[in-house]
Amino acid sequence: ISQFSVTQGENKGPLISKDGGEVTVSASAGTGTYTWSSADFSNTSTSKTFVFNPQSANIGTRTITLKVTAGDFSSERVLKLKLVDTYPNGRTDTNGNGISDSKESGNSNNELPAGTNKKITSPGSTRILPGIMGEDSGQLTLDQLKQYRVANHLSDYTKDTLATG
């Protein structure tokens, strides 16, 4: 399971609203049997797409889990969404990176603003996502990275990773 894509109306990304209508979560995943689960949203999808209406869910961080099984092997990944009552006035996120377009200088998936006239840029084929944080925040803490790794059953490669600044 390489990534999730979240869409609600014209908005993309992990910020969703109770009054925004149906939400579609699409997964980029290999072939196999797809099992979606969530304590917050109901759906019986067995495909790469999970559609739900968040209207009756409680605001806050909500999770959806996808498990893909192929033969004796399986992979599981957790998606965290931030549910609010209503989108902030005029907020749009056309590239789905979790940052309001009004806070960005452009709409590149591989860039995040990091202060006045500064940005974090990854290689063109990689997508930077800030995850579930403050409404327009682009900062990840080490604890958030660790939580993401544990929640998605990912290996800890920190000993093999060079620090970048």
Image (cartoon, rainbow, N blue to C red):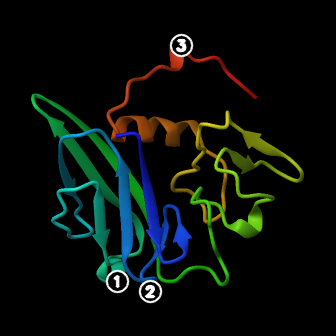
What is the x, y in percent for residue 131?
A: 52, 52
Question: Hey, what amino acid is under mark 1?
Answer: Gln
Q: Residue at x 76, y 29 (%)?
A: 165
Q: Residue at x 58, y 50 (%)?
A: 130
Q: Secondary structure at mark 2?
A: loop
Which circle marks residue 35 in the picture? none
Residue 2 appears in which quarter of the rendering? top left
What is the x, y in percent for residue 134?
A: 60, 61
Q: Secondary structure at mark 1?
A: helix
Indicate left or right for 106 with 83 as reference.
Answer: right
What is the x, y in percent for residue 50?
A: 29, 63
Q: Nearer the viewer, residue 38 or 52?
A: 52
Q: Which residue in the protein does label 3 denote?
A: 160
Residue 92 appears in which quarter of the rendering? bottom right
Q: Dot 2: few (<14), some (14–19), or many (≥20) neighbours within 10 Å?
A: some
Question: Hey, what amino acid is under mark 3?
Answer: Asp
Q: Are marks 1 and 2 in contact (CB under 8 Å)?
A: yes
Who comes first in sequence, dot 1 or dot 2? 2
What quarter of the picture does the N terminus occupy? top left
Q: Are marks 2 and 3 in contact (CB under 8 Å)?
A: no
Vertical position of residue 154 compared to residue 35: above or below: above
Q: Which residue in the protein does label 1 denote?
A: 55
Question: Hey, what amino acid is under mark 2?
Answer: Asp
